[in-house]
Amino acid sequence: VSLMISTAIHPPPLVHEPRAPSFPRLFRMTGSPGNRGFGRYLRQRIKTLVAREKTPVEKAITMAYLGSFLVDHIVHAEKTACRILEHRDMSEPEETSLWDHHYGSVIPTLIEEQPDAENIHQALQQLEAYSRLPQSIFRSRQRHWNAIRRLLESGHTPESPSETELTALAKVQFVLASERSPRAKARIVCLAASLVADRICWCRHIPWPAAYLQTMTDIYPFLVTQPDVLQEIIYLP
């Protein structure tokens, strides 16, 4: 399968946000990007781990997440070559441009090695939606905005965002453990995340999209064991 990539691709926030905290764990598994054989070993690991995932969305997340570390390895090698051959350190804009270029070519190559490449590619294009409020939830919020505003304005203090986050995360766990349908769970999770984002935005003066992204990133670990709900969130209209 040859995938046609018409626009530049980048790691979706769902993949990019947890990258830094995972460096130690990944390097324990594969070694440093500078180590000999790192790229070959990691590429084989990616192929194996992606094949184990059950849904296209899970495969796409694993592909993008581990593929980004493979790109780190390639860029590390090119930075080293620049230092040795050109006797200079690569500039930050050069490194960023190089990283984006390699990510845009490495990920499609890795996807093509999978038997269900087209489905993975389609899912990868949808991952960005995880970090944006679905339009259907936005419309529901508009219909009930007066009640939401009263919630926001009641007893807001500098400490309340953290308390709200903890309460919401506990409720999300309760919802995920319930007998509701995956679609119903997905809608409740997104609505809960939007309410937390409201409070964070209100109390901390953080832009609302960034607050929602932060909340959905915090919720993601609870969804790892519920791929059907994760898929519903990503495809909610």
Image (tube, rainbow, N blue to C red):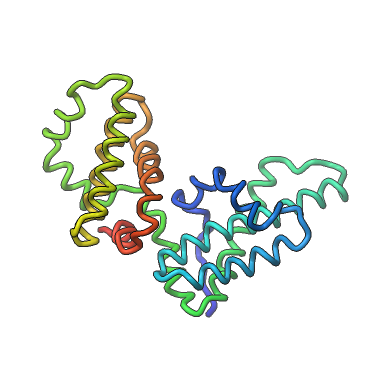
Look at 83% across and 41% down and name the residue there.
Answer: 88
Q: Is residue 201 visible to us here?
A: no
Look at 17% across and 30% down and name the residue there.
Answer: 151
Front residue of 207 and 186: 186
Residue 160 vs residue 88: left or right? left
Front residue of 21 and 9: 21
Q: Is residue 172 visible to us here?
A: yes
Give x and y (percent) for residue 69: 62, 55
Residue 92 vs residue 131: left or right? right
Look at 52% across and 73% down and name the residue there.
Answer: 3
How many marks do you count on the picture?
Answer: 0
Tell me the quarter of the picture where residue 54 sits.
Answer: bottom left
| 41 in relation to 169, above or below | below
Quadrant housing the C terminus = bottom left
Look at 75% across and 43% down and name the residue there.
Answer: 90
Tell me the quarter of the picture where residue 171 sits.
Answer: top left
| 112 in relation to 59, above or below | below
Residue 167 vs residue 68: left or right? left
Give x and y (percent) for residue 62: 50, 61
Give x and y (percent) for residue 114: 53, 76
Give x and y (percent) for residue 150: 14, 28
| 93 in relation to 28, above or below | above
